[in-house]
Amino acid sequence: MPFPSNFTWGAAAAAYQIEGAWNEGGRGPSCWDTFSQTPGNIFDDHNGNLACDHYHRWREDVALMRQLGLKAYRMSLSWSRIMPDGVGAVNEEGLNFYDDLINGLLEAGIEPWVTLFHWDLPQALQDKGGFLNPEIPEWFAEYTTVVAKRLGDRVNHWMTINEPPVVIGMGYQQGVFAPGRKESHADCLLAAHNLLKAHGRGVQALRAHASGPQQIALAHTAREPIPATDSEADIEAARAKYFGCSERRLWNIAWWADPIVFGKYPEDGLENFAAELPKITDADMALISEPIDFHAYNCYSGEPVRAGPDGKAETIKNGWGIGNPRATLSWLNIAPEAIYWSTRWQTERYNLPMVISENGVCNTDWVHLDGKVHDPQRIDFMHRYLKAMERSIDDGSNVAGYFYWSILDNFEWAEGYKERFGLVHVDYTTQVRTPKDSFHWYKDVIARGGLPD
């Protein structure tokens, strides 16, 4: 069965990774400005001050999206560009920028899918504790209300927060991303609970103040265990590991998704983390479980697991084989089965339409002597993952869209400008954009509404 005729073909990017203009147009600093401008935090001390200069070059970028034939563009808003202090005064120049960008997308026939928060918390709010401060749900609601009133007549698809495991796990537990904290597991569970309440307040604000019809989600991610064989034992062991909450880290998808969909935390997590849990009230859970419309999921990689003697999943060391295909980032194994199993299992558990809100691969791309950027590995990666997603749809998964990460090469967080994920090559010195071979391949996929024969 081919992809549905109404399938959403898109690409994605995030404000801090492409906009630049970090101190222009009335924008206030974010925690990622502070983090990336601190020596030693980012590869070669890169920062996002200029990035892809999308703030000034967005018309050129939208023209490229139109050339690609995108049906939708997943973008994020810079909270501190709209409200420099996070709350209070609204920066009209910042709102005007997003007004113009969204109008430009719509004129190009591209639907904007807007993420409200993609990691760049205003530094003024980070100085008050960020997600450890119990006021953050109200801060987020105030910001979302401003956005919904201004943009909600034209934006119909929203994601409140991108990848909570990264926000809290890598930002507050491991300290490798902004704000660079290394808090206790108990404090991270508190920050996680506050984040979920902020999501709930964001949903409420969108419902109350966006004038058009809204489709709302949170963009999840996780680490995908992939059954080593098709045996029932391996499949069930991998599924249990995927949704299990036994590990003292923040990458347990059920810890984030179950409260939103079911209104309660997973029982195994409540039992395993009992001594460290914050106070959780019925009112909290009612807020967190404000109804959503779809499940957004960012999927990249995975590791093979098998059922051990006790039936529980065992990760297979070198399970893909020594020297297996992988991206230039060591964690990104080429594992298209990840997109098959994650969409299948989430469809079964949560019974919501799914959208793959990110999927992509980083490569050593450069402009060749012929003036083009040849990236056959990326084409092969996309082909394999889309085939796996097509198989999942054939098997009953309700997958309604796919957003390649990313439209442009950009600032790849702690990796700086070393890693290139884009369909369009960016020369960061000249800001010249060069569509890669993968750009043209994906253009054909979008035009035909599916994979080549």
Image (cartoon, grey):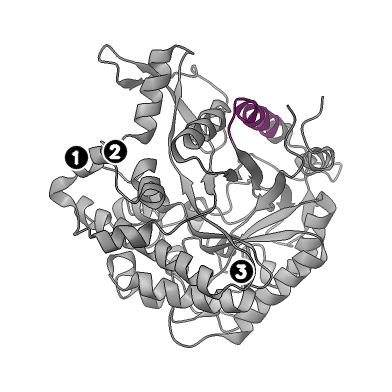
Q: Are marks 2 and 1 in contact (CB under 8 Å)?
A: yes
- Graded by Cα atoms within 10 Å as few (under 14), some (14 to 19) or many (20 or more), the crowding at tag 2 reads many
Residue pointed to by mark 2: 245
Q: Is residue 9 magenta?
A: no
> Which quarter of the image is occupied by the C terminus?
top right
Residue of label 1: 272
Q: Mark 1 and mark 3 in contact (Cβ < 8 Å)?
A: no
| Element under disc 2 | loop
The magenta region covers 380-397
Q: Could you tell me which residue is drawn at 77 percent across and 45 percent down?
A: 367
**Disc 3 from disc 2: Cα separation:** 38 Å
Q: Position of residue 76 (x, y in %)?
A: 58, 63
> Residue 125: which quarter of the image?
bottom left
How many marks can you see?
3
- Asked if residue 89 is positioned above or below residue 46 in the image, the reply reads below
Q: Secondary structure at mark 3?
A: loop
Contact? badges 3 and 2 (CB < 8 Å): no
